Amino acid sequence: MNKILDASLSDKHWGMHIMEIEITYKCNLNCLHCYNRDEHNHEMPLKTIMSLIKAASQQNVQKLVLTGGEACLHPNFYDLCKEIRERRNEFAGVKKFVLQTNGYSSTNCRRITISL
């Protein structure tokens, strides 16, 4: 995994500035335009997600986007948020965390706020 990230140039004007991690294929919508309309429910393991975030931080990725399907439907989504918060000092290289969501989470949440 680090071989891919190490390929980015060390100059701050080049390299990887944005990383998107598709943590699940699950989605609660069925949009016609979506490439992810299959019935598979693949979820990236929490350990793998955290490893990618750590690698992104080490490479000073400016923005890290958690996406899916619908990222909030990942079975360990709240554990993921908690672990990111608890390890925020370890991920200081990432300047901005973004949650890409359709806003129709089946968890009955009206608002999700993560303060890092």
Image (cartoon, rainbow, N blue to C red):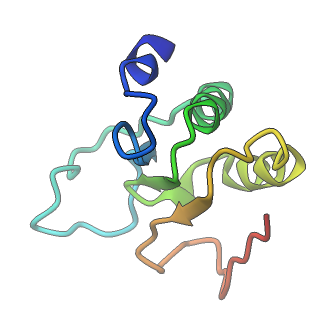
Q: Residue furthest top?
A: 3
Q: Quadrant of the C terminus?
A: bottom right
Foreground of the two, 38 or 81: 81
Horizontal relation, residue 89 to residue 60: left or right: right
Q: Position of residue 7 (x, y in %)?
A: 36, 19
Q: Is residue 8 above or below residue 87?
A: above
Q: Nearer the viewer, residue 16 or 30?
A: 16
Taking the spot 10% from the left edge, 65% from the top edge, the residue there is: 33
**Residue 75 picture location, percent across and down:** 63, 47
Residue 76, image x, y percentages: 69, 45
Residue pushed farthest right?
86
Query: In the image, what residue occupies the spot 47% across and 79% down?
Result: 104
- Residue 1 is at least partly visible in this image: no
Rendering quarter of residue 110: bottom right
Q: Is residue 36 left or right of residue 7?
A: left
> In screen coordinates, is 100 left or right of 115?
left
Task: Please identify the quarter of the rendering in which residue 38 is found.
Answer: top left
Q: Residue 108 falls in which quadrant of the image? A: bottom right
Give me the residue at 54% from left, 64% from top. Answer: 98
- 79 left or right, relative to 71: right
Residues 115 and 48: in front is 115
**Image height of 32 relative to 51, above or below:** below
Q: Position of residue 83 (x, y in %)?
A: 81, 45
Can you name the residue that lies furthest to the left here? 33
View extreme (bottom): residue: 110
Whether residue 31 is visible, yes or no, is: yes
Is 36 rendered above or below residue 111?
A: above
**Number of marks in the rendered image:** 0
